[in-house]
Image: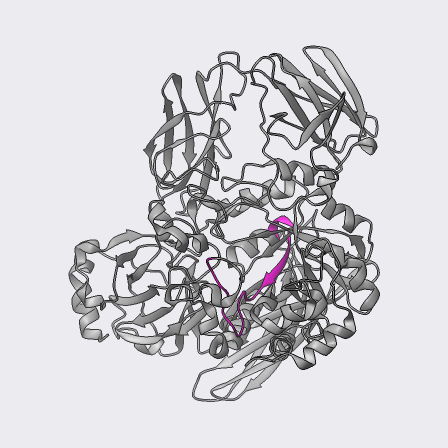
Amino acid sequence: MSTKHMLVGLMAFLMLSCAKVETTQSQENFNLDWNFFLSEKAIDFNQIQNNQYKKVNLPHDWVVEGEFDESLGKDAWATGYIRGEGYGYYTKIFDKAVSEDELVYVLFDGVYNNATIFINGHKLGFHPYGYSPFYFEISEHLNKDGKNNVLAVQIDHSRYADSRWYSGAGIYREVALITDKKLHIPVWGTFVTTPKVSKEKAKVNIQVSVKNAFGENHEAEVKTVILDADKKEVASVSKTIEISTKNTQTISQDLEINNPSLWGIDSPSLYTSVTTIKKADQVFDTYETRFGVRSIKFDTNEGFFLNGENMKIKGVCLHHDVGLVGAAVPKGVWKRRLQVLKDGGCNAIRSSHNPASKVLLEVCDEMGMLMQDEFFDEWDNPKDKRYNKWEEKSTDYITRGYGEHFQEWAHKDLTNVMLSHRNHPSIIQWSIGNEIEWTYRRNAATTGFFNNMSWKGNYFWSEPPHSIEEIKHLMKTLPRGKYDIGETAQKLSKWTKEIDTTRPVIANCILPSSSHLSGYSDALDIVGYSYRRVLYDYGHKNYPEKPIMGTENVAQYHEWKAIMERPFISGTFLWTGADYMGEIRQSWPTRVQPSGMINTASFPKGSYYMMKSLWTDEPMIHMATQTLEKSLYKLKGDDLIEKKKDGWKHYLWRWQDVNEHWNYNEGDTVVTEIYSNCDEIELFLNGKSLGKQKLTETVGNIYKWAIPYTEGTLVAKGTKDGQPIESQLITARKATKIKLNADSNVITANNEDVVHIIAELFDDNGNPVRSDNKLITFTINGEAKLLGVDSGWKNSVEKFQSNKGTTHNGKILLILQVKDKTGSVEVIANAEGCTSESTTITIE
């Protein structure tokens, strides 16, 4: 694409829209005022008419803007029922004056995917991986007068089913423009670690890279000052260096902080190192790095320690989409989702199965959430995207993903991720891969789990049918294949440790009995077990030198029970923290994989409350109901028992079908389940006691009663350590009112802040109505952008980006995002048969 074509094709558009002039600073927000065009086929930028572009701000995911489409059929099993196929074309027109002693970089945190970047018609490069950050130096290609520069991004998403989960498409993460003097700290040029930590003193080491792009040698002072959360100086160090022309030099600086505020789950204290490069009175660069003071340790017998405290990792796996915003997730949306999870006792996130965004890592740092940052879902061989099984089952053009680029790009992508993420204190593990063993056929064959007619066990609940010696023998005798899993793992681990040895290398192993002997686990500091809690004792006994933990498990009581009974297991990451689009295993109109503890609107589900009862100490009660016929139970005389004996020991991903209301038909027998950490609970219906139960006597850690239905008030009264608590369900009448609840009444006019508004149905008596649903229409008056609506229901195929939607369980979520104007925005909700309701948000 030539400069001439680029400028001619966009000049008229520039004259009409008057591109905003960016101010010169070290790092500029480059997310505003982009132009976007979506094409069904690959074209040149000069083929796009000016009036075909639409204005967008970043982050931007073009897929989530679409309709749910049943006609996608099995292709939708991979990424969800929204059509994502296409070629995206982005341009940004900007002014940038650059002096002779300056350099300019453009930094992308993530573009999905197969992106080609241009500046003023010059091709900067190609970047295939949708989850790794990258940057280009663009100084020499900027217009000499600094005016009307055109940054252009072309995205090829013709392989629209190239992921096993919803990927979205577009420049869906943030972009920054960075201006530096030619003597400067390069992008990602600092690394702060805390090698020795105590409550009295912390040793801090900072590795600083200094780049000299001048044509002569330079002597300069490199000074680092550490500031606490109140911007008070707590330590400083200075060093004079001489750096030769066209060279980059890395220096090490050591500092001490007295009585440090440690970064932890309950008190995530953060510091900022400010590094200045100075010569005489001239400051060449000032570079800030936020970090935390903390120590981590994984012990083979005692598990995980944070700042010397032994604790369990209470983690969940999260994909990168968040309901109605798709993959383009504002910081405020991540904050709400993580706060809901943290309120449920969660203290860790696994970024399954790709590197996390800069924004998500910042939120984890600020909220005290541990993070396992995962690099890849595919290595040498492709995974089947539709069926999630064998490679040859379904791989064609549209499903070919990162496996096409792994050989050429893995080192670069892993390096970029680590350099950009390594200063985040929330990251405690680097994961080099997820369930990779499936793609190396020898590994599955050695275990004896599959195609073994003589074995009568169960993959989830039985130990491997083959002995260690048998597995070793098969490893030696079965065909190796083009690539070896152990060799690739060693390569990835080596690259990781060349950059950072302060965090362990881990992987999520679906076939650990094989991985311990294939060379795979030799590359790991910790072996993660995927759905293999039955092998915890097996692994600890046979490989006592290796720490092991759960890295993908189901959100069920039996999983946590197994961990609590074993001090050597550090914890787990449950599948999943939230429902996500893609990896669909049910028929239309199911649009998500409904394995989450919360749904796509971040409304909690049954498994959330079960885990909260296990993960938190504050007394809690959650009541759920269902007719006896639809429940997991049956009556045997007066006893309520499981339909399947000991079924609770083997429940998998989906929680049982339960309701949060007391609205049934007279004569129904209704099972009431209560998820609670109370020592005992007594249940009352209309003031009459239905009996008292103790938690230690429950089956599957669930209180349960079978009750002949009568309308009225169902009350559960419990005590925990002598502290009383109660909860109730009340029979509701028809919905006549809507109540709006905003998570903030005042937001900032910065084009970024969001407000979440929950619309909930109530009856005339003020009782929540959860057994009936209404189509609610929202009217928005004021300077705010409607991001969309979502009830969270797995079977809702209503368009996200709309001002109307149908409630589920009596509620629906609406999200607004501010623009750059102060004032107020009014939201009005209307539904048939209900009085309208409004709320006003102030924008400052």
Magenta part of the chain: 365-386
User: Looking at the picture, how far across and down is residue 667, in whole percent?
Assistant: 61, 13
363 up-or-down from 344: above or below: below
Rendering quarter of residue 714: top right
Residue 371 within the magenta-colored segment of the rendering: yes
Residue 259 shows up from this direction: no
Give whichever of 827, 767 is nearer the camera.
767
Residue 548 within the magenta-colored segment of the rendering: no
Q: Which residue is drawn at 33% across and 58% down?
A: 85
User: Looking at the picture, how far across and down is residue 213, in whole percent?
Assistant: 45, 83
User: Looking at the picture, how far across and down is residue 299, in whole percent?
Assistant: 80, 63
Rendering quarter of residue 819: top left
Q: Residue at x 48, y 68 (%)?
A: 392
Give whichever of 140, 86 is nearer the camera.
86
Label total for image = 0
Q: Residue at x 67, y 10 (%)?
A: 686
Quadrant in the picture for the C terminus: top left
795 on left or right of 536: left
55 up-or-down from 128: above or below: above
User: Looking at the picture, how far across and down is residue 771, in whole percent?
Assistant: 51, 23
504 up-or-down from 32: above or below: below
